[in-house]
Amino acid sequence: MQWILQQFEDTQKLADALDRLGISYSWHKVVPFVGELMPEPQVNDPLAVVMFGSYTLWRYAETKGLYPGVFRIAPFVHEKPWQSFMLNGPNAVFLTVSEIEAKLPSDSNHWFVRPVADSKELAGNVKSAADIHETARMVMSLDASEIPNGSLRPDTLMMLTEPVSILKEWRIWIVNNKVVTYSLYKEGSRVTYRHEIDEDALEFAQSLIGLNEGYSPAYVMDICRTEEGLRLLETNCINAAGFYAADLTKLAAAIDGIA
């Protein structure tokens, strides 16, 4: 597998793991708004290339016909096998950015908000209704030509749910329907990265994978523990998700050997 990396702190950690495995890679910068790479990579076999860095690399991979390139995933909220396990999934509100001003109440409520697609346009977070309205107004005030690729647009579909108290949050890396590695990344309100996971949480994750084996050859799943039990938070593109305290040697080996 040919590895193409965009320079970030996390991808440097991945490069260190590739070094330990004796796997070669090349470094590249992404030309803003254009999506080309500098320097242009010399691709040996377009059907054996993987890219790690920003989510926008998918455009380059798709244009050049690289496989697996970037493992794009469908919006997790539409995956029926998972819907009953999602955090607040059954009570979610779905609005495009252009609909927020008219349809989201301007009150003192707070919402967990994120784009439905795994597009990295906005990180999922709890925001006040006022802040969400302000963000929507800013987007709507721009001409389409003024909005950079990868930013919120009027037609971006957003998911809004009531905030829930979360006790622990884990990220799990999945390749070929198997958990390869994992990391705790939040405990209560405190961000903390440790290479650990509760046994029942690991079993919960593996059960979710089994319910939806055709989802993607490789992806990231975030799960959490609430007072009501374990829940699915979201899924993310494995090529652009933070590594936290994952075992990157295991992850790199699994990706390099993917069929």
Image: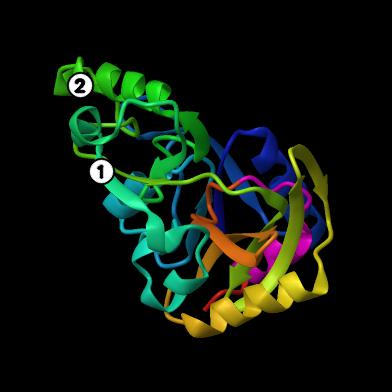
Q: Position of residue 57 (x, y in %)?
A: 42, 44
Q: Position of residue 255 (x, y in %)?
A: 61, 66
Q: Secondary structure at mark 1?
A: strand
Residue 159, above or below 181:
above
Determine the main secondary structure of the stretch shown in magenta: helix
Q: Is residue 256 visible?
A: no
Which color scheme is applied?
rainbow
Q: Nearer the N terminus, badge 2 or badge 1?
A: 1
Label 2 is placed on what type of residue?
Answer: Met
Q: Position of residue 130 (x, y in %)?
A: 39, 21
| Residue assigned mark 1 | 95
| Residue assigned mark 2 | 140
Identify which residue, 69 or 100, lies in the foreground: 100
In the picture provided, is 258 more to the left or to the right than 55?
right
Identify which residue, 56 or 65, lies in the foreground: 56
Identify which residue, 4 or 147, lies in the foreground: 147
Camera-side mark, 2 or 1: 1
Residue 186, above or below 171:
above
Q: Position of residue 31 (x, y in %)?
A: 39, 27
User: What residue is rendered at 80% in x and 42% in y?
Assistant: 192
In the picture provided, is 8 more to the left or to the right than 36?
right
Give the residues in magenta. Answer: 242-256
User: What residue is rendered at 74% in x and 38% in y?
Assistant: 189
